[in-house]
Each structure stands twice: as C-alpha cells, then as structure tokens.
Image (cartoon, rainbow, N blue to C red):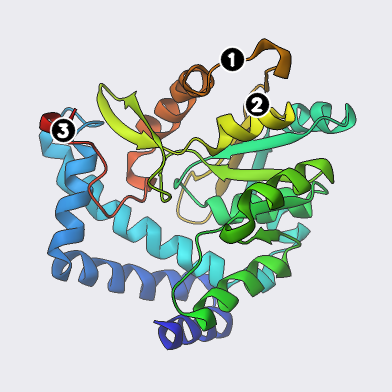
Amino acid sequence: MYFLYLLGKMIALCLPRSICYMVAKFLALLNYRLSVKDKEAVKYNLSAIIKDESRIEGCAREVFVNFAYYLVDFFRFSRINHDFIKKYVKVSGLEHLQWAYSQKMPIIALTAHLGNYELAGAVTSLLGYPVAAVALPHKDQRTNNFFNSNRHRVGMKVIATGSRVKGCLSALKDNFVLALLADRDFSHSGIKMELFSRFASLPRGIAFFSKKSGACIIPGFLVRVDKYNYHLSFEEPMCLARKENIPEEEIMRRYIPVLEKYISNYPEQWYMFEKYWIPENSQ
C-alpha cells in the first residue's frame, strides 16, 4: 500500500484537482464493483440511517466516491493554505472555539469519520488553533510516516497510540486543541451506546479526557457541500466541570445527538467500511 499512496500523492500533486477527482471517481466506482465485502458493510451500516431502502445502494456508491475525493485532498496537503481555505472552505461557529481558547480552557474537538476530518484538523491549525490528533498507526512504518508527515505539513501534532493518555493530557495542558474521533472504537475498550436506535461500541476517550482534564468539548465537522467546496462548522461547547463527577456514559449521551445529526445529514460522507452495529443477538 505504501507505494500506492506514494503514487497517489504524486498524481495528486502533478495534476489539477479537477482531473484528480475524475481519476479518483473512476477508481472508486471500480472499487465499489470489486470490493463486495466493503460494499455490503457500507450498505448494512447505512440501513440504520436511511429508511428508504431504494436510496441505500446509491448512497453507498457515493460513500466510495467521497472517500476517494477525501484521499485526493489529503494527498494535496502541501497545497493547503489560507488561499485554499478562503476559496473552498466556509467556516461557521468559529466563535465557539475562540471563546474557549480565550478562556485558556483545555479543548477537545469532537469529530467523526465524516466528510474530510483530516482537512478539518488542517484548516483549524492554519486558522491559528494548534491541533493535536490521535491517529491510528499503520502496520507499515513507512506508511505511518507518510501519513504523519502530511499532517505535520499543516502544523498538526500527531500523538502516538502507545503514549495516548500521557500525550493527550500533555497536549491539553499545552493549549493544543485535542482532536478525537467519536464514532469508532479501535481500542476494543469502548462503551456500548445507542445510536440511531441500534447499538455500537463508541470510544470512551472524549469522555475520559474531559473528566480527567476538565476540557471543554466542541463538536466540529468539515463536510463536502458540493464537489469542490466544504463547510467547517463548530457547535456550541459542552463544558463539564470535573467536580460534577459525571459518568462517562452520561457525557457520551450528551454528544451522541450531535453525531446523529451530522451522520444523518451526510450519510454519503460517513466512511465505515466494516460492519458497525453490534448484532442484536449479542446485546
């Protein structure tokens, strides 16, 4: 995969964005036809969100296409600057981030595998709010370095999984915006929570670090509004004092409606290529 990523980056940087998108869409549709297991997983995941079964097939196809577009823009991170933001990214709700930052509060940015979450971190960093993100490491160290070097280009700090607790608390203390994904548990230590009237294992990191540090949780999502343009929106902060001693499950219940709102509004941009829901017989 490492050499495919290198090739993808070379093409993304040599060709105009419009041509890159054309190539990406062709490959995405080919992948949709050939990757039967991934296609069925995406359709299964969408079935909890889209009640009209006739729409699921088309939406699943768009998931593959949008993910390919996401990769194109990630490969082009060296071209991301303030001019790109001004031309292609509408930003709203930045006052929420500014308020918490001006109060010198620890900040956790809650997001999901939706839209272009990598670009969300890049834009936030370029707007003057240093971002630290926990990234799932790749098995191949070369691939891991490839992805992390791209993140470093836009000023993002990457926290290694092995030092996650210490690294996250240190980042919060040093006034980094700690970006965490709220929709997928990769550690297998998540909490079973209800989402879209089904159950899924959600990561406990956001609730844990909020309780541990007193951090303010600010949901932020960058979604594609059309082929070339994005909207980065920040929601109202959830400020939970440590002295309240709120259980992790209760903190998670408070932000689940925000996850449901964005995923239901943009199901074609939710990138889940493995079966997500906990089977009923294991509940």
Q: Earlier in the sequence, mark 1 or mark 2?
A: 2
Residue under label 3: 282
Graded by Cα atoms within 10 Å as few (under 14), some (14 to 19) or many (20 or more), the crowding at tag 1 reads few
Q: Quadrant of residue 77?
A: bottom right
Residue type at mark 2?
Lys
Q: Quadrant of residue 201?
A: top left
Structural distance between the alpha carbons of marks 3 and 1? 28 Å
For the point 63% across and 14% down, the residue is 245
Structural distance between the alpha carbons of marks 3 and 2? 30 Å
Residue 208 placement (x, y as % from top left): 59, 32
Question: Split into 4 quadrants, where in the image is the N terminus?
Answer: bottom left
| SS for callout 3 | helix
For the point 39% across and 38% down, the residue is 266
Above or below, comparing residue 131 to residue 10 in the picture: above
Residue under label 1: 246
Residue under label 2: 211
Q: Is residue 173 left or right of residue 280?
A: right
| SS for callout 2 | helix
Residue type at mark 1?
Ile
Residue 185 placement (x, y as % from top left): 41, 44
As rendered, which of 43 and 55 lies closer to the eye?
Answer: 43
| SS for callout 1 | loop
Graded by Cα atoms within 10 Å as few (under 14), some (14 to 19) or many (20 or more), the crowding at tag 3 reads few
For the point 78% across and 34% down, the residue is 106
Residue type at mark 3?
Ser
As rendered, which of 86 and 102 lies closer to the eye?
Answer: 102
